[in-house]
Amino acid sequence: MMPLMNRYSQEIQAQRDFFSAGQPFSFDYRKQQLISLKKAILSYQEDLNEALAIDLGKPEFESYMTEMGLVLHEIDVVIKQLKHWMKPKKVKSPLFIQPAKSYIHSTPLGVCLIISPFNYPVSLTLSPLVAALSAGNCCTIKTSELTPNVSLVLKKLIDSTFAAN
């Protein structure tokens, strides 16, 4: 078995290179990624329902209410607020540097690792992904081995939605 760092080092380096190119910083790119994720969740909803039923015994209503519905609502809220959140925020300047103007610029940090648990495998994987994408970061996802069917559907969803950068 290959050590974890060697196994994922090429993928993580590719994400770091993509991040360094600066594309994830733009509002349009972030918004498009979130819209693509929302479309993918809606198109894989039946597969996710079936996988959640097999792995965790969740009925369809519970799957929507506790997993996909939460993430879909979160995406809508984030898209609505994203432009505002990305704006620099003016703050008071210390007296000793007057008459300066000071701002806080929120900037992405790079590559994130999302490790999802077994109990809410969809929402606790995709919700951090929404946050990371809206912040302009790249992500690597490690799904739970205790929910193999959900993990397989999430892999298909992610692979069909995002380019391997």
Image (cartoon, helix red, strand yellow):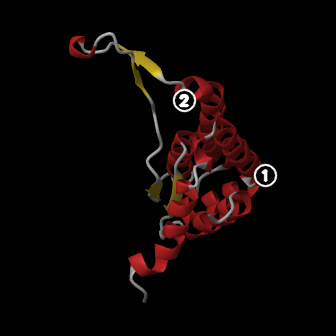
Task: Say the numbered circle drawn on residue 30.
Answer: none
Q: Position of residue 111 (x, y in %)?
A: 47, 56
| Along the viewing direction, whichever of 32 and 52 lies nearer the viewer | 32
**Residue type highlighted by circle 1:** Ser
Q: Residue at x 46, y 39 (%)?
A: 107
| Quarter-of-image position of residue 115 | bottom left
Rendered view: 10 above or below 74: below
Q: Residue at x 57, y 43 (%)?
A: 130
| Along the viewing direction, whichever of 35 and 10 lies nearer the viewer | 10
Q: Residues within 10 Å of mark 1 (few under 14, many from 20)?
A: few
Q: Which residue is mark 2?
A: 86
Q: Residues within 10 Å of mark 2 (few under 14, many from 20)?
A: some
Q: Is 1 on the left-hand or right-hand side of 55?
A: left
Q: Where is the C terminus found, in terms of image quarters?
A: bottom right
Marks 2/1: CA–CA distance: 29 Å
Rendered view: 111 above or below 95: below
Q: Is 155 on the left-hand or right-hand side of 146?
A: right
**Residue type highlighted by circle 2:** Met
| Along the viewing direction, whichever of 97 and 7 lies nearer the viewer | 97
Rendered view: 158 above or below 67: below
Q: Position of residue 15 (x, y in %)?
A: 54, 62
Q: Residue at x 53, y 26 (%)?
A: 85
Q: Where is the N terminus found, in terms of image quarters?
A: bottom left
Q: Which residue is mark 1?
A: 43
Q: Is residue 153 visible?
A: yes
**Residue positioned most to the left:** 96
